[in-house]
């Protein structure tokens, strides 16, 4: 129903924010990841997901589209509700969640309060293929990693070495998706093996 809500941050709490836009204040539930990104902002745009139940209409907000996409994948898993998905997003960054699920690291998921062994295995089983096949490179990896200096430095170095920027970024996205954030020299070395 709402793709995003943009406006003035009237209230900021670790679990929810109130955004005022055109005279309407929207109370939006958020994760700690989003709260951290909003700390210094007075205005923002949150990508939203409306959860409708018999007794409540709850609006969830996400700092970027990747976080919302992961949230929607998580709630598609049997036994994982919106509150649990938000708790996972509060405990791990979107990048860490993708790495945890694609690598099959059930122990890391179990470290999240309320996630037991069976739930962790179910999440991995149902989402591993989706996260592996789905192209998160534009939003998740590029969006998160381009803010990381080592990523930008690696792209610049590869371009200086004569490689095409888009091909360099694609190689680095694959490396970061598989292995996580790494120092510039490690990223460059691994990318050179792929290009």
Image: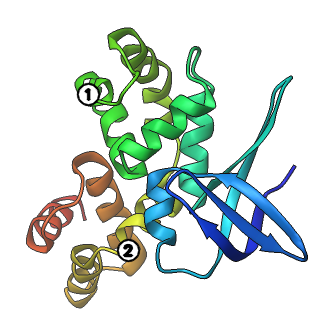
Q: Which residue is more in the foreground, 77 or 135?
A: 77
Q: Helix, strand or loop at disc 2?
A: loop
Query: With respect to residue 73, does 116 lie above or below?
Result: above
Residue 133 shows up from this direction: no
* Rendered location of residue 95, percent (x, y): 37, 51
Among all residues in the image, which is located at the extreme bottom?
A: 160
Q: Which residue in the protein does label 2 denote?
A: 146
Using the rendered view, name the quadrant where residue 76 is placed: top right
Q: Residue at x 10, y 65 (%)?
A: 186
In this picture the colour scheme is: rainbow
Left or right of residue 111: residue 115 = right
Q: Which residue in the protein does label 1 denote?
A: 105
* Rendered location of residue 58, percent (x, y): 76, 41
Q: Which residue is more in the foreground, 182 or 193?
A: 182
Q: Residue at x 28, y 22 (%)?
A: 106
Left or right of residue 66: residue 56 = right
Query: With respect to residue 108, does 174 lie above or below?
Result: below
Query: With respect to residue 25, does 90 lie above or below?
Result: above
* Rendered location of residue 168, percent (x, y): 32, 72
Using the rendered view, name the quadrant where residue 43 is placed: bottom right
């Amino acid at each position: 129903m709402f793709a995003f809500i943009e406006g003035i941050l009237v209230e900021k709490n670790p679990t929810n924010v109130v955004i005022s836009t055109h005279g309407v204040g929207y109370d939006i539930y958020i994760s700690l990841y989003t709260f951290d990104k909003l700390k210094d902002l007075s205005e923002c745009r949150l990508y939203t997901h409306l959860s409708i139940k018999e007794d409540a209409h709850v609006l969830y907000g996400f700092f970027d589209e990747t976080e919302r996409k992961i949230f929607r994948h998580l709630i598609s898993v049997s036994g994982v509700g919106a509150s649990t998905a938000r708790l996972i997003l509060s405990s791990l960054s979107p990048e860490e969640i993708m790495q945890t699920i694609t690598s099959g690291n059930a122990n890391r998921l179990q470290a999240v309060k309320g996630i037991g062994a069976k739930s962790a295995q179910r999440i991995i089983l149902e989402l591993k293929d989706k996260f592996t096949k789905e192209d998160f490179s534009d939003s998740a990896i590029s969006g998160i990693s381009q803010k990381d200096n080592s990523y930008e430095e690696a792209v610049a170095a590869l371009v200086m070495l004569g490689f095409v920027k888009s091909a360099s970024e694609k190689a680095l996205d694959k490396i970061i998706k598989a292995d996580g954030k790494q120092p510039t020299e490690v990223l460059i070395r691994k990318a050179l093996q792929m290009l």
